[in-house]
Amino acid sequence: MNLDYIIPNAWSIIEEGFNPDQVKASESLFSIGNGAMGQRANFEEAYSGPTFQGSYIAGVYYPDKTRVGWWKNGYPEYFAKVLNAPNWIGINVLVNNEQLDLFNSKSIKNFRRELNMKEGWLSRSFVATLQNDVEVEVSTKRFLSLDIDEVGAIDFNVKPLNTDAEITFQPYLDSGITNEDTNWDDKFWDTLSVSHENNQAFIQAKTMKTDFYTCTFMESQVFIDGKSVIIEPNIKADANYASFSYRHKVKQNEIYAIHKFGGYLVDRNHDKNNFVNEAKSVLAKATRLGFSELLNNQKNAWSKIWDMSDITIEGDVKAQQGIRFNIFHLNQTYLGTDATLNIGPKGFTGEKYGGSTYWDTEAYCIPFYMATKDQSVARMLLTYRYKHLEKAIENAQKLGFKNGAALYPMVTMNGEECHNEWEITFEEIHRNGAIAFAIYNYYRYTGDYSYIPEMGLEVLIGIARFWHQRATFSTDKNKYVILGVTGPNEYENNINNNWYTNYIAQWCINYALESIEKVREGYEDDYRRVSGKTKITHEELALWKKVADNMYFPYSEKYNVYLQQDGFLDKELITVADLDKSQRPINQKWSWDRILRSPYIKQADTLQGMYFFEDQFTTEELERHFDFYEPYTVHESSLSPCVHSIQAAKLDRMEQAYTFYLRTSRLDLDDYNHEVHEGLHITSMAGTWMSIVEGFGGMRVKNDTLTFEPKIPKQWKGYSFKVNFRHQILKVSVNQNETQFELEGDTELQILVNGESVTITPDGLVSV
Amino acid sequence: MNLDYIIPNAWSIIEEGFNPDQVKASESLFSIGNGAMGQRANFEEAYSGPTFQGSYIAGVYYPDKTRVGWWKNGYPEYFAKVLNAPNWIGINVLVNNEQLDLFNSKSIKNFRRELNMKEGWLSRSFVATLQNDVEVEVSTKRFLSLDIDEVGAIDFNVKPLNTDAEITFQPYLDSGITNEDTNWDDKFWDTLSVSHENNQAFIQAKTMKTDFYTCTFMESQVFIDGKSVIIEPNIKADANYASFSYRHKVKQNEIYAIHKFGGYLVDRNHDKNNFVNEAKSVLAKATRLGFSELLNNQKNAWSKIWDMSDITIEGDVKAQQGIRFNIFHLNQTYLGTDATLNIGPKGFTGEKYGGSTYWDTEAYCIPFYMATKDQSVARMLLTYRYKHLEKAIENAQKLGFKNGAALYPMVTMNGEECHNEWEITFEEIHRNGAIAFAIYNYYRYTGDYSYIPEMGLEVLIGIARFWHQRATFSTDKNKYVILGVTGPNEYENNINNNWYTNYIAQWCINYALESIEKVREGYEDDYRRVSGKTKITHEELALWKKVADNMYFPYSEKYNVYLQQDGFLDKELITVADLDKSQRPINQKWSWDRILRSPYIKQADTLQGMYFFEDQFTTEELERHFDFYEPYTVHESSLSPCVHSIQAAKLDRMEQAYTFYLRTSRLDLDDYNHEVHEGLHITSMAGTWMSIVEGFGGMRVKNDTLTFEPKIPKQWKGYSFKVNFRHQILKVSVNQNETQFELEGDTELQILVNGESVTITPDGLVSV
């Protein structure tokens, strides 16, 4: 389905009117999270229609057995799977003993759902007539607290409109849950105990195999017309379920409400032997504040986040909604507070991609986190990979590499590879390049070199060793070639000399050589430690250099462009514009062989390379390559349109840049790729941020200087963004006439605007 | 493990001495079958050591759910899996209440196992001392009857050597079996009933999902010193098991024996509602004859098979044993009596490759069956594919082809594709070529053109349509190219312009065009029917021709050879001779990406093409290609060495031809590929036959004439083979000095020997 039901609004995602066909999509779009946990926007009350239930705890996964038709040497035995966690949001609502269930109501009016991004909460309201003809007005509000990140809170109100009615709230916990992607009725959770006390219940459960211990908890309070009432609940508890029933005869137009607090403790942060007591104290903190105060704290916390990371767009509410949606979800997913966590491509909004770490983090997310958070957050993401270096070396060994060569996994939770398609796992080796590039990018942006001697150099050496060993010499070409790879354009597999891969391999070797030299000269102790540990020798470095200096790059004299790979010109070069629309998206319409032999590009990796290494190419070169590759690009990777948007802006093609911007920023809201029901594309949201800041704003860092070439789509009156540059906040506001720069900081800042030097004083404002 | 424990013998496979490490290998090597069923050489009595239990019924399979990490459009939802069928051979033997179990005996002496290929039976004998110190001499004989192909018979003898002993035979049926390859504890059989009557028992069971109904049955008789005795058995029967216990106090040196008859009925041949009665009448037929008479019939039946298909080799017992082993197993696997059956690569000796049909049948097996059976057998194999044409068209449609284009499945049981690796399922499309080639080959050999107008032409049209649509035009090369394929050399995936594939595609189109013309001219009714059904037009045929006439073939001017695929010369061309032996076989030592980027060839498809289309290439061309590709060929496909043997012989490299011959003929006996425990390589055994008849004998059919260029390895005194050529039997005997031709038939036969015409009269003998 392609969606267009989300109501444009600057600060909220809004759905009006109930449509069961949209439920799964909305469950994705209205997802909430707080970095420590997250959930799809499932209803609290029963729902018998099609739904995709999902509640996820950061860092909790399951090593599922790899299942392939034919085993290949080197496959990991297990892959990390994100797990649907025990349900704590559930509240069955009985009205005169009939389940409130929107899929089974006589009529539904005034259905409205809102995700308020400014304040960080999700609400829902509707009027439903049940089969028993009781008409009820329902309104709910839910959030996952940023303040106490183990807790969420629900306010659920029911008002009978046409009669008195006996209404029962049954808040429950349920650990008898399954995964959506489970084809084999597997069980992933062992419930260890179910207990309750007063109005609180606790389910202790552990994941099978990984033994992550969790305690899911809840506490409820009920209200009549806003006044707390004491109702003795009926209690039900069995092997993996606990519920309280609060039954009350509610008068017509009286509001019966429940506040439910719930959440998870994990043994990463708590003593599992004292889970119930610790859960009690977390609950005590939350209930002491109460729903309203906790919600106030939520608003304040989000206010601080927006203060640093908001992007405003004037005159284009859909564009405004799109960028805030992206920034909001990025902040819901990762807050940079836990060194063992990372950014899964679906965040907490779905199961696919296993909630694991991909090259997306280094290639797309780090710039966003560098510019909108303290630089320690980006450094934490780099450290995550440093901690996995040993496992990356083991991973390379499994594939026959030696001498400390490192191949980072394509997909990981704990440093081990956990993906099992040979063309990806073994061949999509460019990921190594993004990890090295992020080190370079971090230093370029923050000026903090210390990461390299302390940790990064070892990573760079492992990666350079890999490339040196992976390249082979072609006598025929008299060059080094890299055979049998999958580039970022995953619509080509097992190709030879993917230009992007060859280029980044060469760059990695050169950057490692340069870094070794720089550390040797400036950081003697670190150099001694690292060279002792890695045993690098002059001879080895000379061999690396030989490979880098003699790398082969496929080139077409006819088109005057680098070729995406050997043999690209053998394809039937029919542009996307000339492809029948009924065939799109090709990854849902075509068998894999047809995709592979077509010229269609999932994301243009040649352009991706020219984005990373922009300085190495003239604008004319970029333009030629853009004109050559863009027409074959289907953008079926969520990571694709943002780079095209940035490059189109650079090439002064503002209409095209704007179209790509909408595509990247509203990818999920408008469901361009027909898959939003599976979850959101979190990592590409950072690309959306880049398409404004780097694309329209033209921001770069060159020689320790922030530079801008501001442009603005004609559809907009103005836009603004803030960046945290070396501990000072620079606000950039662009309108059709001028650009304003405003500095929150204490040091004068010298920037370049369209090549001209501009000085901005602390708390001063400069218009250009 | 590499084996060398099989004792050389002209007519038997013999193992002496008991080694538990060899049990699984021997279970494969000593397998028995009769075309309708087959079994690994599992012991009848209990065995607690490592064993791979397997009993298989022809045509009985299970559609197992495809399990892949990441689904790709076009994958079949199910794949056909060969099923381990209920066990009927089991006989527990209790000696003073201790289980006879070779893995748990105090000592074992004189262990000997023999597979007598001349007469078609398997025997075993040994002396074991049990933990209770009773020493018993055991001898068994077992065969699956060719005469009554639903029955097998076992003669099991136990003689206590050092004491009197109470011995119990517990013959049983067991349908509570699993598959060796089941990782998920799946159940494949539903037992419907277990019943018994007198000394007979019956288990009716059906396969899950496919609903193949079977009745497994047994009947036993016991003997003392050869005299039938009546012992009232204890009977045990439960949900999927039935056993009789025949207990007897046996005197020292007395022989206690049991004859067990058992087997399967399937609902393909019987009314499943009357299974027990029909099983009783099958048992009555068998027991009326008794073990000895049934065994006599077995010897006679095998004698007839050998009379037509034996190959003798004088002066080289290992070579003799090898070829007979191959011919024996081919005849155990497929007898050409059932049009729904085909030849699985592992026959009835293992589970891998699902017992399904591959291109092996057309590329390797048909010549053997044409020359050693009535030509109706080969025609039945061709008809099998004709009957699957509609499904091949559906299969092509799933991959986006249209207008009746047919892509035969890579692996099938019933015409549907049942393999799920994209690089094989979607890309190993050359299989279509072998199916067309077999039609050509059948006509060339038998002179029976009728198959083409009646059935073959439709197949050829569907295949030509596929190639026409699959080729694309490369503007860059100004030629038609075939992108993204896997050739017969499966150590390259998703390559462009595999020479073999392009060549056979071109040939298929030309052969289809020629056949259409010939049928149009000579078989008007058939032409009208086929052209009406397929709606071929002149315009369409012209388009096919354009593709065939402009097909691209990668070629190296430097080496003066066709290249296996685009870019082959970019590889690091280190020959197999220079590869460290510890790295072999590479498919067990290397990860898949490393295999793919290496130059190593599983089977040399360029040479395979030059084998099929020998007439199109000069001997010098063949020699250049052989010299170029052979050094990179690791022969890790069982289908590889036979073709190299034939070509080495043609090139007068008799030492090399002889080495390849040993490798193909003793592939399993000497376990070249370290995998015999998984089962035998049945289809490549037909290649062994070719390497003698076509390789050493130099036999070809040219212009309806049999031609020979006999050669002989220096290790041999002589060899002989027989071929059924157009309803006459020609025996060819070659020694170091001359070749003798002998004709059983009624018409004079004109042949060419080394280019000279020779006339052979019926029942006459000619020496050349």
Image (cartoon, coloured by chain):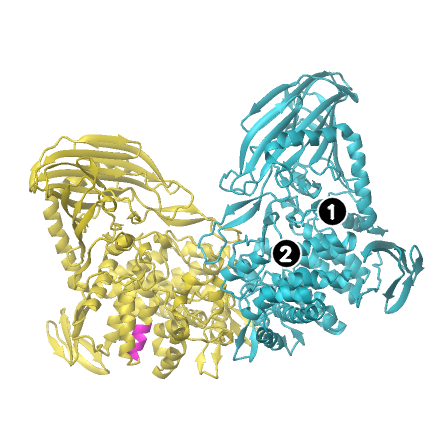
Chain colours: A yellow, B cyan
Task: Using the image, determine if residue A282 lies above or below residue A320.
Answer: above
Task: Using the image, determine if residue A121 lies above or below residue A616.
Answer: above
Residue B215 appears anywhere in the view: yes
Q: Quadrant of residue B520?
A: bottom right
Chain bearing mark 2:
B
Q: Which quadrant does the C terminus of chain B fall into?
A: bottom right
Q: Quadrant of residue B36?
A: top right
Front residue of A263 and B761: B761
Q: What label sits on residue B331 in the rendered view? A: 1
Instruction: Name the front one of labels 1 and 2.
Output: 2
Q: Look at label 2 and name its amino acid.
A: Arg
Does residue B216 belong to the magenta stretch? Answer: no
Front residue of A294 and A384: A294
Left or right: B202, with A64 as reference point: right
Residue numbers of the magenta segment? A644-650
Left or right: B313, with A434 as reference point: right
Q: Main secondary structure of the magenta part?
A: helix
Within-10-Å neighbours for mark 2: few <14, some 14–19, many 20+: many
Q: What label sits on residue B385 in the rendered view? A: 2
